[in-house]
Image (cartoon, rainbow, N blue to C red):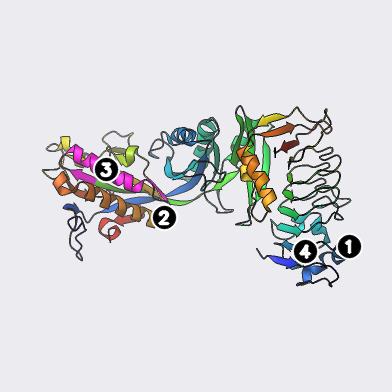
Amino acid sequence: MTLWTLRARDGNDTPQHSIDGSVISCARFAECDNIAAITTTMGSSTCRLSDWFDIEESSSPSHEIHIVGDCRWLDRLAAAEPGTPTGARAGRITVHGSIGHLAGHRMRRGELIIDGDVGDFLGAKMIAGTIIVTGRLGRSPLSSARRGTLIYQHRFDWHPDRFSRPMRLDFPYASLIETVGCSKGVIDMIDRARRNVVEVRRGDRNENGQAEVVFVDR
Amino acid sequence: MSDVAPVLSPGGPIVINGVFIEPEFAEAFDMKATRLILTAHDRFWVDQGAAALVGFGTSVIACGLEIAVEQTLGPDQSPDGRPGVSILAFAMSGKELERQIPIRLGQCVLTCPTAAVFAGLDEVGGNRVAIGKSIRFFGDGHQISKKTLSSKTGQTKHYWRIPVMDGEFVCQHDVARISGIGGGNFLLLGTTLEAVLTATRAAFEAMRELPGIITPFPGGAARSGSKVGSKYAKLFASTNDAFCPTLRGIVPTLLADDENAALEIVIDGLTAHDVAHSMKVGITAAAQAVGSAGGLMRITAGNYGGKLGRHHFHLHEVMK
């Protein structure tokens, strides 16, 4: 895997793009002053704007993308592009900061790790995959989700009819989630999910689905 | 230690602690192999699950598989941070391996409380042996598929979460199938059964944690060494009468006058180097533990004249 770094606008400096793949989203970079760096494992020639939506579209079967810095302006991360049926289908996107709305919309596979807050409709119509959030959830997370897993640690008042009553369970799958390259906040949270009994709710009744939400007590 | 060091001379005899190492060779065969990692909540359940999984797995002659625990794994060595073991399985054909593994996992590991099973080989692509690919159907539609990206290898790992009565059974989708070698061996011959048993245990203890090999028989040793063929037409193997002390005088014997017991240690390994190294370790440990003074007189190896197996492990070469 080739690891490369894009440096975005830093304060009043001009954007510093080290490779040709920097065409990825110059316009979007310019919208945000807070992104420090984006590192991906994708080759430059395959990196394009749509990679923000569907990281499986690139040539390599699996990718890891790190987005460092708050980017609340960035909506639809790992989500289905408008007009397409599925969002991310593989790989892992780690956001070291907060993110905008509709992240993981129609997400099909892969992992979305957000070390910060998320906007509204996180994982809406999610098909499968795993979303991990260390910060606060916006409105209507997992709205109409069919399957998939949301792991979070800040209390959220779920609509009483949506999921099953919370069950206190071991959650062995947490042990298999890789946290290499993640921040201490994510590592601590997943570590607690591995060691402790967690609160699980199952079965999104909105969609008659099997989505699950896993609350890791702080 | 000077009295137990190997006496080496080019082309001459090898003697360790008075034990004569014969210039014989072990004849081994090509097999298909895989490695599984079994974990559980604590060591008790790991051992229970492993004992069930490797039970009745001594010889491909009738068990389908030769399967045994390879190494004990601590929580820092296992995929899910729990205590575990790595297990090697060998079969004569890839098809048989692919048939036996899911059956054993379904009956022995799926049933074991808190157990989980993972692939122990990192090879991607090629021939695969099903794990969760078969067992997932036990979930009756409630099984959950999960794919995670390994940062280390850049490859995606595919897991299944199957609902069971203690929570979830987690297992990997499949595991690679590779070529292995089965049938490495050496025979320990002594004046008394006590001496040979002690030597066998010493060899087994020295070899049991070596990576890449298993000794599938009880305590690593087979007392029923076999020869090819039988007077009974249906049997293709029968007792190795040349090494049976009670048959001396009835059939031609390979036992010396003062040798009254023999045991065979059988080794399966992932590579020829693994097998050869383990033979050296085992032979050295056995000879040093007992020696000729204790009653271990000779160490030799079993073969079929070199016509059946492609791999020949000459004792004098492996001891170099």
Amino acid type, mark 4: Ala
Query: Chain ID for label 4?
Result: A
User: Same chain, marks 4 and 3?
Assistant: no
Give the crowd class for mark 4: few <14, some 14-19, many >=20 residues within 10 Å: some
Q: Which residue is mark 4?
A: A36
User: Same chain, marks 4 and 2?
Assistant: no
Amino acid type, mark 1: Glu
Q: Which residue is mark 3?
A: B200
The location of residue B97, given as percent across then percent down, is 49, 42
Q: Which residue is mark 1?
A: A31
Would you place residue A108 above or below residue B108 in this image? below
Q: Which residue is mark 2?
A: B271
Q: Disc count in the image?
A: 4
Which circle's residue, 1 or 4, is located before the other in the chain?
1
Front in this rendered view, residue B34 or A174: A174
Amino acid type, mark 2: Thr
